[in-house]
Image (cartoon, helix red, strand yellow):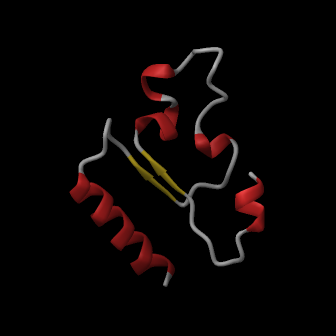
Amino acid sequence: LRAYVATPDPKWVVALGDCAADCGVFAGSPAVVGPLSGILPVDLHIRGCPPPPLDIVKGLLALIETRA
């Protein structure tokens, strides 16, 4: 959270993978706080465990096109 606050605008947060999006296979564990979107405003969710590299590239390009 400190890194997010310290980063100047504009900034994007990408939830990369199922664990970041909804805790994935660790959902329900007492060691997991919850999805990233419950802590920070998420600009992009890229699903997968792990996410396919092409999905990462496509997601980032789409984010750049919509936010640039």
Residue 24 to residue 43: above or below: above
What is the x, y in percent for residue 60?
38, 67
What is the x, y in percent for residue 11?
62, 71
Residue 3 to residue 10: above or below: above
Residue 8 falls left or right of residue 47 = right
Residue 12 to residue 8: above or below: above
Tally of marks: 0
* Residue sitting at x 68%, y 51%: 40
What is the x, y in percent for residue 68?
49, 85
What is the x, y in percent for residue 66?
45, 77
* Residue sitting at x 74%, y 51%: 1
Residue 51 falls left or right of residue 10 = left
* Residue sitting at x 64%, y 78%: 10
* Residue sitting at x 64%, y 19%: 31
Q: Nearer the viewer, residue 6 or 57?
A: 6
Q: Nearer the viewer, residue 26 or 37?
A: 26
Determine which quarter of the picture holds residue 42. bottom right
Residue 1 to residue 48: above or below: below
Residue 63 falls left or right of residue 2 = left
